[in-house]
Image (spheres, rainbow, N blue to C red):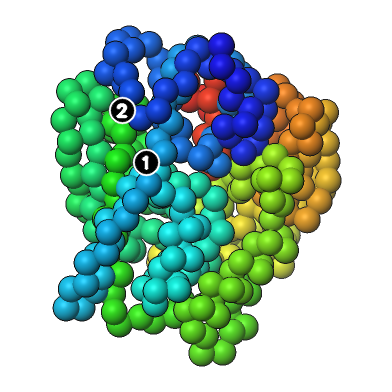
Amino acid sequence: MHNLQALHTFGLAHSAKRILPLGEGISDFGTERFWILGQGSNCVFVEDFDGVVVQVNHAGKKITELDDHYLLEVNAGEDWHSLVQFCTEKQLYGFENLALIPGSVGAAPIQNIGAYGVEINRYINSVEFFEISTGQTHRLSNEECHFGYRDSIFKKELFGKVVITRVLFSLPKAWQPVNHYGELAKLNSPSATDIFNEVIRIRQEKLPDPSVIGNAGSFFKNPLVSKKHYAALQCEWDQLPSYAVDQSSVKLPAAWLIDKLGFKGKKVGGIQCHPRQALVLTNDGTGTGEQLLELAREIQQQVNDVFSISLENEVRLVGKEGLITL
């Protein structure tokens, strides 16, 4: 068995049968279970994994200037924040709201990462991958990726069947700031660099550093509810914030719901609901998968009992046989 503690940012002390770099024997493990792993910033191994962990770590990028946009071809193993920083310095704008999100480029379309009013599908041109069963390479257009809120075809129909190898992005030359969301609204006519720096400041202030204390960022998704449901909640919780989604639904901040129930700072063994950001669960180095699931399920249950909202985990939980749900 091979220890996985250093390979995922939550840092639970679990193992896998084998660890292979991408391209080294990926077609040779037959019927063995496998898990595709980038930087391990959005998954938690809550048990020993009875299979092979395949690491995607091939980096590299290419930029092509076209008439009205830049085409970026980026290998899946490239570090996401390093790419954002590189593009900002090169005046290739659009990614700045997504600064300091941990993880690799290949994970970005799977999760359709987003922050501060921007989701990455806005800039994805296409995604390249190879099919594990055949070894053939394919490319899906943006539309074919079926992007949704923290969702894509790679979490559904293609889950466990393909490995993303490269992502192609289209960054328009005509840039417009997106600064209507949260604390960014305080910025007056910001440049892309202003937004980049402010997002980093906010995230460093609010979110714990995984290199200091184990965590996987936001543990739960922000729930979408109908406007009717939201109006009913406001009768009792008149300070409950919301963000418009469409004519019939709004997005609610899961951190606010969890905070109102008094979970900030709560511990179960070595697992804690972070004292400054209720949406983040942390591991002090002694936590276990059982403790994490216990605290997460307690939060989920109480939010459902009080607000009639079913929270979904944003972090992917990996058990003995693969993906599990709360």
Q: Are marks 1 and 2 in contact (CB under 8 Å)?
A: yes
Which label's residue is closer to the chain start, 1 or 2? 2
Q: Position of residue 109 (x, y in %)?
A: 36, 48
Identity, as a three-letter code, of the amino acid under mark 2: Gly
Please indicate, yes or no, whether residue 147 appears anywhere in the rendered image: no
Front residue of this view, candidates 303 and 288: 288
User: Residue 8 vs residue 261: left or right?
Assistant: left
Q: Position of residue 85 (x, y in %)?
A: 48, 66
Considering every residue shown, the one lying at the far bottom of the view is: 189
Q: Residue at x 78, y 56 (%)?
A: 276
Callout 2: SS: loop
Position of 244 relative to 321 (above/below): below
Q: Residue at x 34, y 51 (%)?
A: 60
**Residue 88, image quadrant:** bottom left
Q: Residues within 10 Å of mark 2 (few under 14, many from 20)?
A: few
Identity, as a three-letter code, of the amino acid under mark 1: His
For disc 2, the marked residue is: 23
Position of 158 relative to 50 (above/below): below
Q: Quadrant of the C terminus?
A: top right
Callout 1: SS: loop
| Distance in Å between CA atoms under marks 1 and 2 | 10 Å
Q: Residue at x 62, y 38 (%)?
A: 9
Q: Residues within 10 Å of mark 1 (few under 14, many from 20)?
A: some
Please indicate, yes or no, whether residue 254 appears anywhere in the rendered image: yes
Position of 105 relative to 63 (above/below): above
Number of marks drawn:
2
Which disc number belongs to residue 58? 1
Q: Quadrant of the N terminus?
A: top right
Front residue of this view, candidates 247 and 136: 136
Q: Residue at x 17, y 23 (%)?
A: 134
Q: Position of residue 69 (x, y in %)?
A: 24, 74
